[in-house]
Amino acid sequence: MSKIIGIDISKNTFDVSYLEKDKWQHKVFKNQSKGFEQFKKLINSADWIVMEASGPYYVQLATFLNLGNYKVCVLNPLIIRRYSQTRLYRAKTDKKDAKTIAEYGAQYELKRWYPESNHCIEIKQLYTALELLKKQKHQTKRQLESFEVTGLLSNNLKKELKQLLLLLARRIIKFEKQIEKLGQLAYKDTIQRLRTIPGVGIKTAIMMSVITDNFTKFENYKQLTAFVGFSPRLYQSGTSVKGKGHICKMGKPQIRKLLYLCSWSAKKVNKTCIEMYNRLKEKGKPERVIKIAIANKLIKQIFAVAKNEQYYNENHQSLYCAK
């Protein structure tokens, strides 16, 4: 008989919980190869193994189980947190969390998890490292400027900080070239199509291909919009409570940043975005709101071009209205 196995995973161990003969079972294993092999003895091919995307700690176990052709579902931790709140659970232990995950898995439809491609993982890691280097460069530059304002900066320290800035700039260029090279190698055709969209640059084309795993993860553009974090969030209740609407920023901030930059360019070169900009400007909408609207339009265009495997054509707007 198949069962739903909930796993709460941490750096060193993972807690397992499942219902067997109307009784909850609980076990703890080491988060390493030996623990994986021991855990495998408890499961069969019909079971569902459900876990949270807890930082990087779930990846090895999920990959190991997927290679063994076991059904693995990896959930956003926020889903379990919200489910736990609806159940009014107050206890917060690894054992309780594993049981809660198993309960959720028994009540809702589960989607099987598959590991990302090696190219996708490497580009994501390079991009994260690149963002860190840019942050370090910005902080170092600000610190140098702060020291210089005092008029008390020693020549030796000034020289060291300038050399550090030069080194960081070179590393940034190196990482950007590596990302572009890997992106062209893995998603050449998709990137070529996306770049025909006015306003979409090479960086955005690569990262949109990466986060969607070459547009295989999502069935429609609304799912992609929600994943990135551009979905609108309304705040209204009855007739008296009408709060200000915002976008739901629970997605990917790095991708939102790239799309913001693209929207600024698209309002000047993308026919549909130009029309949208002028229309919203006439209505008195703020620049920030218009920029978000244009970014949403670009997501729709990007998704349609990639999914239909066609180059962008501004005269075929019906193509970019796919649901």
Image: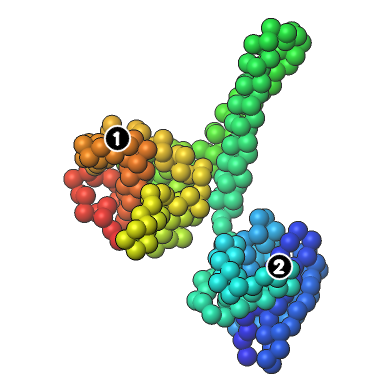
Residue at the far bottom: name it. 21
Q: Residues within 10 Å of mark 1 (few under 14, many from 20)?
A: many
Q: Is residue 18 visible?
A: yes
Q: Quadrant of the N terminus?
A: bottom right
What residue is pinned by disc 2?
92
**Vertical arrangement, residue 175 with respect to residue 114, above or below:** above
Local crowd size for mark 2, using a 10 Å CA cut-off: few (<14), some (14–19), many (≥20): few
Say whether residue 170 is visible: no
Q: Residue at x 41, y 41 (%)?
A: 259
Is 165 located above or below residue 30 in the figure?
Answer: above
Q: Earlier in the sequence, mark 2 or mark 1?
A: 2
On residue 2, which mark appears?
Answer: none
Question: Which of the 4 quarters of the picture holds residue 278?
Answer: top left
Residue 63, located in which quarter of the rendered image?
bottom right
Instruction: Give the x, y percent position of residue 239.
Output: 31, 61
Horizontal side of residue 81 vs 232, given as left or right: right
Label 1, secondary structure: give it: helix
Q: Residue at x 20, y 49 (%)?
A: 316
Q: Which mark is residue 267?
A: 1
Residue at (38%, 49%) from the top-left corner? 244
The Cα atoms of the two marked residues, 2 and 1, are separated by: 48 Å
**Helix, strand or loop under label 2:** loop
54 or 79, which lies in front? 79
What x and y, as percent, mark residue 274? 24, 37
Render colour scheme: rainbow
- Type of residue at label 1? Lys
